[in-house]
Each structure stands twice: as structure tokens, then as C-alpha cells.
Amino acid sequence: MTTPLVKDRIYRSPQALIGGVLLLAIVGWLGIDALLRGHGHTPWLALAALILLVPLVVAFTLRPAVFAGEDRLRVRNPFRVITLPWGEIAALRSGYSNEVIVKSGAKYQLWAIPVSLRSRKKAARRQTKAESDAQGGRTGSTGRVFGGLREPSGAAGPLRAETDKIMDDLRQLLEQRGEAESAQGEVTVRWAYEVAAPAIAGAVLLVILLAIG
């Protein structure tokens, strides 16, 4: 059995997972309470709201993930799954959101790797402080001194936000595997009907119930 050149990696947002679980708990508690204790149309409204909200919460919090393998990058967004062979990826771009750009010009957002401007600013402040401390503790060209311990020059790289580090890892994989023969192919996009259909059904049912009063 051939050992893969690149170990599969999965990237998800811990904050989104925690937020999703909490939201599901709140929605479930309120919805079930209304189903059991409500009167008249209230239980039906609660049921429709649950059918609408639960898939949406799952779609935007628990579902997003990025799977980086030896031959392809698979992006699972709220309502789509995009499979991108490394050979078809032109660039991985970070701005106000993290995106993958394919050679055809299409762009796909990486929902599972959100940009945190706050984390970037925090990392920049830490980097500035680290450089200032390094200049204050430098002795000749031997390195940096922290608490009496000398760190060799160049041992530590620039401090970056966690999602920016992840994008750096993905860019490194793109450089390593972009030209590989097994990493060529077509970009495929599959819609997540299993998520969209229940949400649409819940929305339709909710509108009907509200209309009939």
C-alpha cells in the first residue's frame, strides 16, 4: 500500500461549532416548549420554525469545512460542496474573506476559514512587541534574550492570525501538488439539497400558517 505524500487535513471553525451547538440548544428548547405547551396555531408555527431554522443553523455553523488532501481541495460551504483538484487552483487569496480562485476565474469562499480582523490586529501588536523586545534584548549577533535565555536569531517567524497560518499551509500544499499528474482534473460543484430542501419546506409552511392566521 502506497503511503500518501500529503496527510489529509480538515479545517473547521471552533467558534462556529460552539455557536452552532448553542443556537441549536436554544432553538430546540424554545421550539419544543412551544410544541408541548402552545395552543391553537402555536405548535404548528413552532414546528415550521424548527424545520426552517435547524437546517439553516447547521448549514452556517456545523456544516462548513475544508478538506485538503494529496490531490484535491474539497470545500464544504453552507449549500454547496466544491471539489477542486490542486492543478485547477490559480490562487488562494486572503482579504476580508478567504477565497480560492480557479484558473477559469471562478471564486469560492472558504466559509470554514473565516477572516478575523481582530485576530490579525492582535497578532500584529504581538509581533511589534516581540520585535521591540528582541531589539532591547539583543546582544551582538548571537540572538535574542528572553528571561535570561538566549534564542538564536531567526528561530521564530512572524506572528500571524490562526486563519492566516492555515491559508499559508494551503498555499504550501498548492505549490507542492499543483503540478502533480494525479492532482489534475475538473472542478465540480454539488448543491446540498439535503440542507436547502428542509429549510425551503419550513419557510413555505411558515408563510402558509401566517397567511391563514
Image (cartoon, helix red, strand yellow):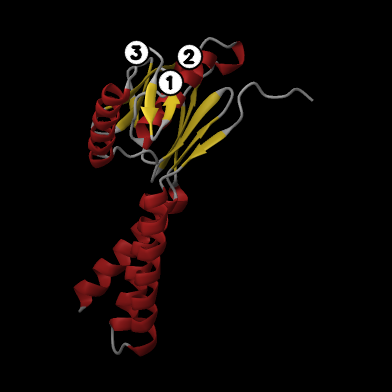
Crowdedness near tag 2: few (<14), some (14–19) or many (≥20) residues, C-alpha within 10 Å: some
What amino acid is labelled 1 in the image?
Arg
Q: Residue at x 43, y 21 (%)?
A: 171
Crowdedness near tag 1: few (<14), some (14–19) or many (≥20) residues, C-alpha within 10 Å: some
The residue carrying mark 2 is 175
Which label sits on residue 53? none
State the CA–CA distance, disc 1 to disc 2: 6 Å
- Secondary structure at badge 1 equals helix
Task: Indicate the quadrant containing the C terminus: top left, top right, bottom left or bottom right.
Answer: bottom left
Task: Indicate the quadrant containing the N terminus: top left, top right, bottom left or bottom right.
Answer: top right
Q: Please state the horizontal and vertical placement of residue 195, each as a whole percent of the image.
A: 43, 52
User: Which label's residue is closer to the chain start, 2 or 3?
Assistant: 3
Q: Residue at x 38, y 36 (%)?
A: 162
What amino acid is labelled 3 in the image?
Gly
Judged left or right of residue 16, residue 190 is right
- Secondary structure at badge 3 equals loop
Q: Residue at x 48, y 14 (%)?
A: 175
Which quadrant would residue 71 be assigned to in this image?
Answer: top right
- Secondary structure at badge 2 equals helix
State the CA–CA distance, disc 1 to disc 3: 36 Å
The residue carrying mark 3 is 140
User: Which label's residue is closer to the chain start, 1 or 3?
Assistant: 3
Q: Please state the horizontal and vertical placement of residue 64, each as a whole percent of the image.
A: 42, 45
Discs 1, 2 touching: Cβ within 8 Å: yes
As rendered, which of 66 and 182 lies closer to the eye?
Answer: 66
Q: Please state the horizontal and vertical placement of residue 17, each as a whole percent of the image.
A: 42, 54
Which label sits on residue 171? 1
Crowdedness near tag 3: few (<14), some (14–19) or many (≥20) residues, C-alpha within 10 Å: few
**Residue 109 in view here:** no
Q: Please state the horizontal and vertical placement of residue 108, each as a whole percent of the image.
A: 35, 30
